[in-house]
Image (cartoon, rainbow, N blue to C red):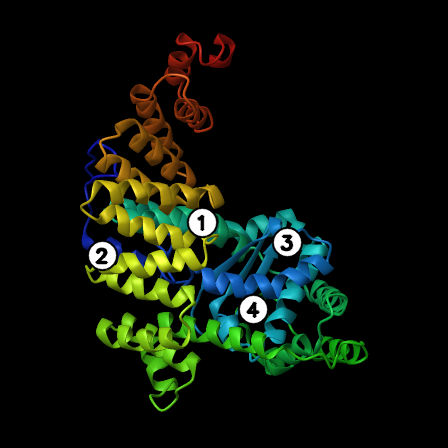
Amino acid sequence: MKRGGGTEEFSMVAPVRSVLRIALAVTLSATLLLRPVVAAAQDSGETLIRDTEIEETLRKDATPLFQAAGVNATNIHILIIGSRRDDINAFAGPGVMGVNTALILETKVPNELQGVMAHEVGHLAGGHSARSDEMMHAGMRPFLLTMGLGILAALAGSGDAAAGLVSSAGYFGALGAAGYSREQEGRADQAGATILEKAGLSGRGLAEFFNNFRYQEVFSEFRRYKYFIDHPLSSDRIDSLQARVAAMPHFSQVDSPEAIAEHKVMQAKLEGFLEPQRTMAKYQDTDKSYTARYARAIAYYQLKEPEKALKLIEALLQEQPDNPYLYELKGQILFEYARGKEAEAPQRRSVALKPDAPLLRINLGQTLIALDDNAKVEEGVGELRKALLKEDDNAEAWRLLAQAYDKQGKDGLARLATAEFNYNIGNLKDARVFAMRAREKLDRNTPEWRRATDIVLVSKPSRDDLKDLASEGSISRSQTR
C-alpha cells in the first residue's frame, strides 16, 4: 500500500475481513465529514465531525459564554461528536468543548443549546475537569479502546480508518472522563445561570432542557441517556435552577430570528448527512422552506442520487447566490461522482466567498491536485498551504499535500509532508522515519530541512538517529546520551 504520496512502498498483511467489523470508517463526504477524521468504534457510535458551517454556528453560540466566564474563546477547540440519536452528551475540559450531534438535534431553540454549553463552561470554570484520578480512570477505557481499534484497522489495511481512530483517541478519552457528581452538577447549574446572565442571555433554555428530561431521574441507569448518567438529575436540582433563572433580569430574553434559522439549518444538515432516510420522511416535498430543501439535497446526496441533490442545490443557489456552503456542497458532490473539472468552479466560489475557512480550501486543493494539469496541481499545493497556515495540525491537508508533491516529483517535500501527516495523527514512528528520509532529499539548512530535523527530535528518535544528527552537526554530541 502506498502511504501519503511518498515514493516508498509499504505492504501490510491483512488479517481476515471480520477484523474490519471492529472499526467503522465513514466514507468521503467532505462537506460534513472530511476524511480521514471520521472513524469510530461501533459499540460507542461516536465519530468526530468537521464542518465549517456547523462549527461557525456553534462558535457563535459558545463565544459569549466563554467571554462571560473569563475564558479565552480562541483557545477552546469545539468538537462535534457524531453520535447515536439517543446519546445526548456534552463535555468541557481545558482547551476543549465537545457537543454530541444528538444534543444539537434534541434542543428546540438555540437558547437550550447555549444553556447546556453554559452548564459545561460552569464545570470548566469550577475546575471540575481537574479531578485527575477519577478523570484518568474514566477516560482510559475509551482511549485504549479507540487506540486498539486504530491498530486493528491498520492491520486490516484500512489506513484512513486507522488514522481517524488514532487521532481521535484522546478526544474520546476526554469524553469518557466527563462524569460528575450531583454536588458538582448543582454548582455547574448555578455557574451556568450566572454565565448566561452575564452574557445577556436567558437561563430559561437551560432550565427547560433539564426539565424536559426530569423523568430520567426515575429510570434505572441502563435506560438513561448517557448525559444523565454522567450528569445526574434530581427534581430538587431542577426546581432550584428554575427558581434562580426566573428571577434573573434576562429571563425574558428570546433568540433572534437569525439565530433560530441558523439552529434549524444546523439540525437539518446533520439530519441529512447522518439520517438521510429519516430526513426524507421528516422534510416532505411539500415543505418549500430553505431548511427543508437543504436537508433533502443532502439526503439525496447521501442516498446516492446526485442529480436530484444537484437540482435542489441549483434552485437554492438562485435564491442565495452568495452562500459558500451551497457551493461547497455542490462541488463535493461533483468531485465524489468523478466530475472533478465541474467541481472546480463551485469550490473556487466557496473559497472566494469564505477565504478564511481552511476546510473549503482543502476541498478545492483536493480537486485541483486530482486534475491532469501541472498548473492546477501547483495551484492546489498553494491552496493546501494556505489552509495549513490556519490549521497547521490538519492531517488531511498534509496527506493531500504529500500526494501533490509526489505528483510533482518533489520527493523531499513529499516525504516531509508525509512526516507531518504521521506526526499529526500521533504515529511518531513513521513521522520519524519519513522525516529522516526527507532530510536526505532536502537541501541542507533550508527551513524544510530544519523542520524535518525538528520532527525527528520530537518523535522519539533512536540512538542511531541521534548519532547521525550529531555527526553532521545538527545537534551536540551530549544530546545523543
Closer to the chain start, of discs 3 and 4, is: 3
Q: Which residue is found at the position 62% from the left and 62% from the top?
A: 62
Amino acid identity at mark 2: Gly
Q: Quick check: 475 left or right of 118?
A: left
Position of residue 349 relative to residue 376, above or below, is below
Q: Tags 4 and 1 in contact by the CB under 8 Å rule?
A: no
Q: Position of residue 303 (x, y in %)?
A: 26, 73
Location of residue 304 in the rendering, given as x and y in whole percent from the top left corner: 23, 71
Q: Mark 2 or 3, which is nearer the eye?
A: 2
Query: Could you tell me if the residues under marks 1 and 2 are in contact, i.e. CB atoms within 8 Å?
Result: no
Element class at badge 4: helix
Which amino acid, mark 1?
Ala
Q: Amino acid at mark 4?
A: Tyr
Q: Could you say which disc has been placed on residue 169 in the image?
A: 1
Q: CA distance from mark 3 to mark 4?
A: 24 Å
- Between disc 4 and disc 1, whose residue precedes? 1
**Residue 474 or 479: which is nearer the viewer?**
474
Camera-side residue: 43 or 269?
A: 269
Please tell me whether mark 3 sits on a helix, a strand or a loop.
Answer: helix
Give the structural element (helix, strand or loop) at label 2.
helix
Up-down relation of residue 469 to residue 223 (above or below): above
Q: Residue at x 36, y 73 (%)?
A: 317
Residue bearing mark 4: 227
Residue that badge 3 annotates: 73
